[in-house]
Amino acid sequence: QVQLVESGGGLVQAGGSLNLSCAASRVIFSIRAMGWYRQAPGKQRELVASITSGGNTNYADSVKGRSTISRDNAKNTVVLQMNSLKPEDTAVYYCNIRASYGVDYWGKGTLVTVSS
């Protein structure tokens, strides 16, 4: 059973920065993409950023220009750096690893609260 462990969430002031990290408990072969999703209270889970095995990135419009996603293929880790945080970034952030054989792995989530 693969577990994804997220870290780096917490309380941040508006305008601040944070790094969210995610590590898999064991090596996952044939990773198609890694990414971060978030879910704010009363809203659906949405993609924040993703990165493919080839390094192609995709960002939600709401975080584009102030976020960077990176990955370490050998360590099966993915990091999301977010800058210029806004209160509307407040959400539970979930790590996702999508394997090429059709399996999605999810972390349990880490809460990010941005105070105004």
Image (cartoon, helix red, strand yellow):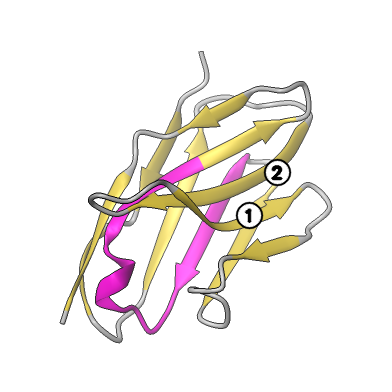
Outermost right residue: 54
Quarter of the image where one finds residue 71:
bottom right
The image shows residue 21 at horizontal and vertical percentages of: 45, 52
* Left or right of 85, for residue 75: right
Span highlighted in magenta in the image: 76-95
Which amino acid type is shown beneath numbered disc 2?
A: Ala
Q: Quadrant of residue 97?
A: top right
Which element carries disc 1, helix, strand or loop?
strand
Please check the rendered image and state whether residue 28 is part of the magenta-colored stretch, yes or no. Answer: no
Helix, strand or loop at disc 2?
Answer: strand
Q: Nearer the viewer, residue 65 or 4?
A: 65
The correct choice, above or below, for 14 with respect to 41 in the image is: below
Q: Position of residue 18 (x, y in %)?
A: 36, 70
- Say which residue label 2 marks: 33
Number of marks in the rendered image: 2
Determine which residue is flagged by label 1.
Answer: 50
Q: Residues within 10 Å of mark 1 (few under 14, many from 20)?
A: many
Residue pictured at 52% horizontal, 57% vertical: 79
Point out the tag, 2 or 1, that comes first from the N-terminus.
Answer: 2
Q: Nearer the viewer, residue 52 or 45?
A: 45
Q: Taking 7 as reference, is 30 above or below it? A: above
Q: Position of residue 2 (x, y in %)?
A: 52, 20
